[in-house]
Image: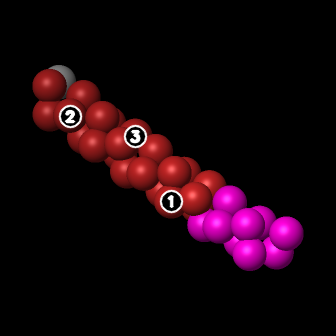
């Protein structure tokens, strides 16, 4: 059970990191554009 939970937490952390990276890229693109 704890292994399953740790796997879920790792996956969610990875998703959050991806979201942050994509949003950062989007913001930098906006900054370059405007």
Residue holding disc 2: 6
Among numbered discs 3 and 1, the one appearing first in the sequence = 3
Q: Which mark is residue 12?
A: 3
Q: Taking 33 as reference, is 10 left or right?
A: left
Q: Residue furthest top?
A: 1
Residue 15 seen by the camera: no
The range drawn in magenta is: 25-34
In this rendering, which labeled residue sits more in front, label 1 or label 2? 1
Q: Quadrant of residue 26?
A: bottom right
Q: Residues within 10 Å of mark 2 (few under 14, many from 20)?
A: few
Is disc 1 placed on a helix, strand or loop?
Answer: helix
Magenta stretch containing residue 31, yes or no?
yes
Q: Taking 14 as reference, is 1 left or right?
A: left
Residue at position x 77%, y 66% from top?
Answer: 30
Q: Between marks 3 and 1, how big is the CA–CA gap?
A: 14 Å
Q: Residue furthest right?
A: 34
In this rendering, which labeled residue sits more in front, label 3 or label 1? 1
Residue holding disc 1: 21
Q: Between marks 1 and 2, how big is the CA–CA gap?
A: 22 Å
């Amino acid at each position: 059970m704890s292994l399953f939970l740790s796997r879920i937490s790792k996956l969610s952390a990875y998703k959050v990191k991806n979201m942050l990276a994509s949003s950062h890229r989007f913001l930098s693109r906006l900054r370059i554009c405007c």
